[in-house]
Amino acid sequence: MNEQLDETAIIARDLIRFDTTNYGEGRSKGETEAAEYVGAKLEALGLAPTYIDAEPGRTSVLARVPGRTGSERGALVVHGHLDVVPAVAEDWSVDPFGGEIRDGMLWGRGAVDMKNMDAMILTALGDVLEHGGPERDLIVAFFSDEEAGGVRGSHHVVEHHPELFAGATEAISEVGGYSITVGGERAYLLQTGEKSLRWLTLTAHGAASHGSQVVRDNAVTRLAEAIVAIGREEWPVRLTGTTSALLGEIARILGVDPERTGPDELAFATGTANRFIASSLRTTSNPTRLEAGYKHNVIPGTAQAFVDVRTLPGEEDQVMARLRELVGDGIDIAVSHGDTGLEVPFEGPLVEAMVAAIGAHDPGAPVLPYLLGAGTDNKALSLLGIAGYGFAPLRLPADFDFPSLFHGVDERVPLDALVFGRRVLRDLLARY
């Protein structure tokens, strides 16, 4: 079987078989074994990996690759993460940590988020080193804890070991570079921004009482009303420079007037990519967990809910004020984790190089900027002044619902897409 697989698929499969589940709030199965596997691959390429443990079992691994021009140009950070979100095996048609090859695809948790890119980085880097090395210095990094905000991963490394990124000016990682279909035409989304992040804990207070009594000061009821208000809030559309440019390009491809065709209609025209694009046009506030009570006949004095809020860059304070209005009195709001929003230019030598790398392997396909509704480890690197882009290139079938597989069931990636990504990254890293 190995002889029939590109090395990228073999490495991605091996990484999937390391169960690096991150449950959040510091609970994880750990990334150390996967980091050591990656480190061994880096050593085999003649590099000297550095291991950083934020806590026991929470390992990130990095290496610097000297470029042909030395330090004359700013270094490029090429990074991925090794952790994955949980997978309920009973919901899957395959073992989520089996790394199964089926129907021309690699299946398993992390196949798209983002052990595929980890593998593409390693194989593309190997190709580049075999043929003279990169043009500029590269810093390759494989972080832990991205799925919980990077507190024990990228943020820890940036805070405690900023010297590892000396000379770095730009970065590439997830979630961009993949193909979508618009009006029957294939195009690629290059991620040039990310929404900001607020993970909120809402705590409602009321009177603890017997379940048989008339209790109007019920914490569960109060919390439920607040959560319904948050979950049903219709946040207005607000276009940033990135989303305005994206919608303009979609309108051009479709041959419609963007002034007469609404933003949501243009987003919908991208098919399955609408899952990502629609959320980039507005703030989102989604309740994700509820906790209350300990017995059927006891009304608890407190109840908690957890809300995932993603705001457009610069709207953080405005959104928090609106959320406080929605929840009303008797409920405390705490930010358990927050991170900044980003927006970087869709221009300059790196963007030109990424567009050219795509064009060399899919001639004529347009490359469009977009704002990611979620976040990546680029947020941590931005604290060092590093401009981060999402570029994990994949050429995908037109009917492939790629966005639904992020944190979804039966996560999988086409094998030929991995080969495509390796080649595009090879060209970028060799020439930029």
Image (cartoon, rainbow, N blue to C red):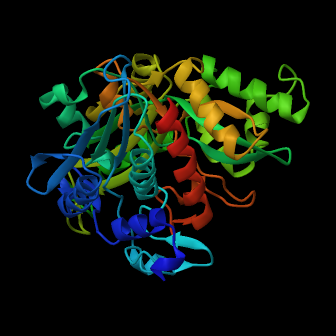
Quick check: can you spot residue 234? Answer: no
The number of discs equals 0
Q: Residue furthest right?
A: 255
Give the camera-side residue of 61 and 225: 61
Residue 193, given in percent of the width and then of the height, sits at 51, 27
Q: Position of residue 162 (x, y in %)?
A: 18, 26
Q: Could one spot residue 37 in this view of the protein?
A: yes
Q: Nearer the viewer, residue 44 or 35?
A: 44
Choose top left, top right, bottom left or bottom right for residue 244: top right
Please report the residue visible at 27 percent of the width from the left and 35 percent of the height from the top.
337
Q: Nearer the viewer, residue 19 or 45?
A: 45
Who is closer to the viewer here, 389 or 213?
A: 389
Q: Is 22 left or right of 114, judged from the image as shown? A: left
User: In the figure, is residue 333 to the left or right of 99?
Assistant: left
Query: From the viewer's perspective, is residue 54 above or below residue 410?
Result: above
Q: Residue 197's quadrant in the figure?
A: top left
Please state the horizontal and vertical placement of residue 355, each as a whole percent of the image. 64, 32
Question: Residue at the location (23% across, 34% down)?
Answer: 155
